[in-house]
Amino acid sequence: MGFLLRTAFWLGVVAVLLPTVTRSPGDGAGASAVSAADAASAAASTVSDLRQFCTRQPDVCAVGSQVAVAIGQKAQAGAKIMMEMVSETFSSSDRTPVTTGAAAPKGDSARPPVSQSTLSAADLAPEFRGPPARREASVRPPG
């Protein structure tokens, strides 16, 4: 079901982004321009038809509302998990308060200072440079 929804979504996006073909009035296609009043009238009739959809199809509306509730609950659960992760991240960060030279609070004196270095031992090791170059033996003239 999710695949079908994603496919329909992306096909809709592609259909919207495709260029439209405009025909000239003389090609016999009889293409007429839609006025703003006609578009507004069509939108109003569509809205009134959608308002009465649940009276015509009560089963579809019931299933649709259950799906909407399930999606809403999943969204709320996901948002709650994300908020817990963010708040846990910010609350567990070891930030020392900025002081103006006054004595540090009593709770912080037992905690060792946190290092700002994020490099590992492998990062600090020198790069491999290979073996040293061989010195060529001096060439002696035959003699």
Image (cartoon, rainbow, N blue to C red):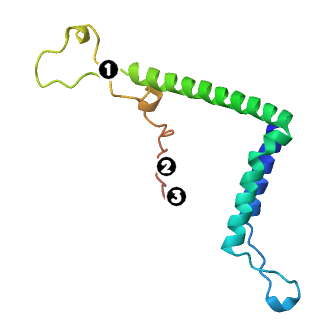
Q: Which of marks 1 and 2 is in front?
A: 1
Amino acid type of the residue tagged 2 in the rendering: Glu
- Mark 3 residue crowding within 10 angstroms, few (<14) / some (14–19) / many (20+): few
Marking on residue 142: 3
Instruction: Please name whichever residue, 22 or 121, is drawn nearer the observer in this view of the structure.
Output: 22
Q: In which quarter of the image is residue 116?
A: top left
Residue 136, labelled with which disc?
Answer: 2
Vertical comparison of 109 with 79: above or below: above
Q: Where does residue 2 sit, x and y in percent of width and height?
A: 79, 38
Q: Is residue 87 above or below residue 67?
A: above
**Which SS class for mark 1?**
loop
Q: Which residue corresponds to mark 1?
A: 114
Residue 9 x/y as whole percent = 75, 50
Real-space Cα separation, disc 3 to disc 1, in angstroms: 70 Å
**Is residue 93 left or right of 101 when viewed as pictured?**
right
Could you tell me which secondary element the residue under label 2 belongs to? Answer: loop
* Mark 2 → mark 3, Cα distance in angstroms: 17 Å
| Rendered location of residue 15, percent (x, y) | 77, 62
